[in-house]
Image (tube, grey):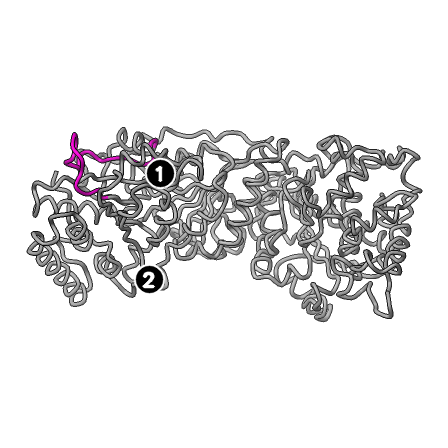
């Protein structure tokens, strides 16, 4: 093993100029954590163990970078950081330096699948990595500051979803060093008995390693790791011998050590080790304070690098021999570069699940139910590399055909009533837990290690994972520029139970703003699709499951909607991402008087109804109907890879005619995407405007002015020559609108002729 006091941060002679320029106090960010990382890396990785490491504490990169370099992986990936004195200098200088790498375990770090820029997701990522990886051990250190976050607190329950016969194992190390930035941490201050009861209550078997003397602590940690490893192997042996499947009590470690352990004890009369002052930069004034500079030099020399390196700055051969070889090194494990292990899904022909459409807009169907049948067969074809996640909503979202192929994973107690439609199974591949955080973490860990997944959730509550989406998008964005990282499967999010169909859930369930969050992220990694019917949804889903390196957001409601395109037409339309629907237009060969645009299922239905009303009132009015499936087609190609060239955009939307755009989400998002376009001044967008309560679908549309009547009136107001001559039509439309709202308030449902409206063909 390599103890931290022997950690080769620098070799003699130490140059004070280099210290001044680089503020190497950064290397002391939580030295106690550095001890844990290096020590765990040396002890847990043996030749017979396939393991990766997840560093939960935010600024813990130094403690992971050091063993990554010592194992030789870093120099293999980055030859300019070679295993000699010059390589060490380059290795040190890049840390937290412009053009270099961050203080978290960023994508540039070999062996990492977890960035840690935001705390709380380490355990869920670790479990996602362990699913369907029966030989993999994921060691995850949880900082005690991180342990105070809601996502982390809930993720302790992830042990209820680890099936020891087919999954790998996760060994959490809860590291209690007592402080966050400048405040104590809760779990470090509660009594030992209370903490032990908490961990046992979560279902873990805790092993405690506590102290401050490095020598005995090293031995105690080694013994705890050995005990935990043997307990894990024993659990797996029993589960894989064919006995009854029960949830085991997995081991975990609680490590209590001083914050800033082995760093400066004190300076200028203030205690540093064991206090909040050791956080990140214990000696912050080395540039201007000679005393601090001297203290830093003494600190760095205390690790005695001359005992570890030869005259050329290369780690001694006898110490190099301690590391595992090849991919048994944690930093070289292919599971931490999951694209290397990725295999494309075997997908059934999505055409086989098509909804028959003999005439556009003549019939209704539940959009997501055929998708459930498609996913069912994806599950059958990929029994160990595809999982579906959802917070108690798989059936609600009409994806329950999945249960014909698999059950819901459940390892807890069973009641007799569970056998009557409960669909619980110890081998289930659908994971439901009422924690979007944990599920998103599972999915991310699963795809980061090369497997494929699908996550469905209600639109209003996908906001719960806004920050997780942000962090994964940032990871993917950076990974695009790291040449040795192989592309991983995409994260696929189905956003359903949407804003426009919240008949009885009301205002709390009306929020389409996740799309605004998605648009903020890098265009290299984000995709947004709003398929309006079954066949476009199937085409989009097939495309997304085949893709790599993206976060695909699919917005499709679960209720009945008009079916608009046969499968051949749907495939062509989705391939284009945006296009004219000839059957709903009457402007072929001439300039349109108005362009009616829709994006989303209910907005499309209402825009079609408005188009029909306008054609009844004004037979000579030339209307072009455009539908958008791929939201990013609205941007120029300079802003997004899917962007439409100006020439094509102008041809579609014209340069000077009024455009009535009916959008699923907040209207200003469309303006944001299209503001550079020539005809933007004539683009009038309708969308959700926070006008909602307990509403019928049409009443909610009326309140937000995306309804057929408001759209038709909008067109009358915008088309030259109709604003006066169309007064009678506007009055009739307003009368119908008033009647529909009054009927909804009296009967609690929409009028039959409105709710059952069909495109007349």
| 226 inside magenta stretch | no
In the image: residue 242, left or right of residue 227: left
Q: Residues within 10 Å of mark 1 (few under 14, many from 20)?
A: many
Residue 52, percent across and down?
Answer: 68, 41
What secondary structure is found at the residue carrying circle 1? helix
Q: Is residue 171 visible?
A: no
- Residue range of the region highlighted in magenta in the rendering: 575-596
Residue at 30% in and 58% down: 502
| Residue 690: numbered disc | 2
Above/below status of 183 relative to 555:
below
Residue 552, percent from left and from top: 44, 41
Residue holding disc 1 = 373
**Residue 92 appears at what percent x and percent y?**
78, 43
Of residues 383 and 755, which is closer to you in this image? Answer: 755
Residue 320 occupies quadrant: top right
The quarter in which the N terminus is drawn is top right
**Corner quadrant of residue 31:** bottom right
118 and 637: which one is in front? Answer: 637
Q: Nearer the viewer, residue 396 or 556?
A: 556
């Amino acid at each position: 093993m390599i103890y931290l006091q022997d950690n080769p941060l620098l070799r003699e002679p130490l140059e004070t100029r280099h210290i001044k320029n680089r503020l190497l106090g950064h290397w002391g960010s939580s030295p106690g954590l550095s001890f844990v990382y290096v020590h765990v890396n040396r002890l847990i990785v043996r030749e017979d163990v396939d393991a990766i490491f997840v560093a939960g504490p935010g600024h813990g990169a130094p403690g992971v970078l050091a063993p990554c370099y010592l194992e030789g992986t870093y120099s293999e990936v980055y030859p300019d950081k070679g295993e000699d004195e010059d390589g060490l200098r380059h290795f040190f200088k890049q840390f937290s330096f412009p053009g270099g790498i961050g203080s978290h375990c960023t994508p540039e770090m070999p062996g990492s699948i977890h960035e840690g820029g935001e705390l709380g997701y380490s355990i869920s990522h670790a479990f996602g990595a362990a699913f369907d990886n029966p030989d993999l051990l994921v060691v995850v250190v949880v900082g005690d500051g991180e342990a105070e976050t809601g996502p982390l607190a809930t993720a302790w329950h992830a042990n209820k979803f680890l099936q020891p016969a087919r999954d790998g194992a996760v060994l959490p190390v809860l590291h209690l060093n007592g402080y966050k930035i400048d405040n104590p941490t809760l779990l470090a201050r509660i009594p030992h008995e209370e903490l032990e009861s908490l961990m046992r209550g979560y279902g873990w078997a805790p092993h405690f390693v506590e102290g401050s003397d490095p020598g005995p602590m090293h031995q105690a940690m080694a013994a705890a790791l050995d005990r935990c490893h043997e307990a894990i192997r024993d659990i797996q042996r029993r589960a894989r011998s064919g006995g009854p499947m029960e949830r085991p009590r997995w081991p975990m470690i609680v490590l209590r050590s001083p914050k800033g352990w082995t760093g400066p004890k004190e300076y200028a009369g203030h205690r540093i080790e064991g206090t909040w002052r050791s956080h990140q930069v214990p000696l912050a004034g080395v540039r201007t304070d000679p005393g601090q500079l001297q203290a830093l030099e003494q600190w760095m020399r205390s690790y005695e690098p001359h005992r570890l390196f030869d005259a050329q700055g290369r780690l001694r051969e006898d110490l190099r021999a301690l590391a595992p070889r090849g991919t048994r090194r944690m930093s070289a494990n292919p599971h931490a570069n999951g694209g290397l292990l990725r295999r494309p899904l075997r997908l059934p022909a999505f055409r086989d699940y098509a909804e028959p459409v003999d005439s556009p807009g003549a019939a209704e169907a539940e959009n997501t139910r055929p998708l459930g049948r498609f996913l069912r067969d994806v599950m059958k074809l990929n029994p160990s590399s595809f999982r579906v996640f959802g917070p108690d909503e798989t059936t609600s979202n009409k994806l329950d055909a999945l249960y014909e192929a698999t059950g819901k994973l459940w390892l807890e107690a069973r009641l007799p009533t569970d056998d009557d439609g409960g669909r619980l199974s110890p081998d289930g591949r659908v994971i439901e837990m009422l924690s979007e955080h944990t599920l998103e973490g599972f999915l991310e860990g699963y795809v980061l290690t090369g497997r494929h997944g699908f996550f469905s959730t209600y639109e209003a509550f996908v906001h719960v994972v806004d920050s997780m989406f942000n962090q994964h998008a940032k990871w993917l964005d950076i990974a695009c520029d790291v040449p040795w990282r192989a592309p991983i499967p995409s994260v696929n999010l189905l956003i359903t139970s949407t804003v426009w169909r919240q008949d009885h859930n009301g205002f709390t369930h009306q929020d389409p703003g996740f799309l605004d969050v998605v648009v903020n992220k890098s265009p290299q990694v984000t995709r947004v699709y709003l398929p309006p019917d079954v066949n476009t949804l199937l085409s989009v889903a097939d495309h997304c499951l085949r893709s790599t390196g993206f976060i695909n957001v699919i917005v499709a409601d679960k209720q009945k909607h008009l079916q608009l395109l046969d499968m051949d037409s749907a495939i062509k339309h989705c391939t284009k991402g945006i296009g004219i629907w000839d059957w709903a237009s009457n402007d072929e060969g001439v300039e349109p008087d108005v362009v009616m645009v829709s994006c989303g299922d209910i907005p499309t239905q209402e825009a079609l109804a408005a188009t029909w009303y306008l054609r009844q009132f004004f037979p000579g009015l030339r209307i072009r109907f455009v539908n958008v499936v791929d939201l990013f087609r609205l941007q120029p190609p300079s802003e997004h890879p899917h962007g439409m060239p100006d020439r094509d955009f102008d041809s579609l939307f014209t340069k000077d005619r009024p455009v009535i755009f009916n959008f699923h989400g907040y209207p200003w998002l469309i303006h944001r995407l299209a503001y550079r376009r020539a005809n933007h001044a004539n683009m009038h967008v309708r969308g959700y405007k926070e006008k909602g309560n307990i509403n019928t679908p049409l009443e909610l549309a009326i309140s937000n002015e995306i309804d057929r009547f408001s759209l038709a009136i909008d067109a009358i107001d915008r088309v030259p020559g109709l604003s006066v001559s169309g007064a009678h039509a506007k009055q009739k439309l307003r009368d119908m609108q008033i009647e529909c709202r009054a009927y909804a308030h009296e009967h609690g449902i929409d009028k039959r002729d409105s709710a059952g409206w069909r495109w007349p063909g």
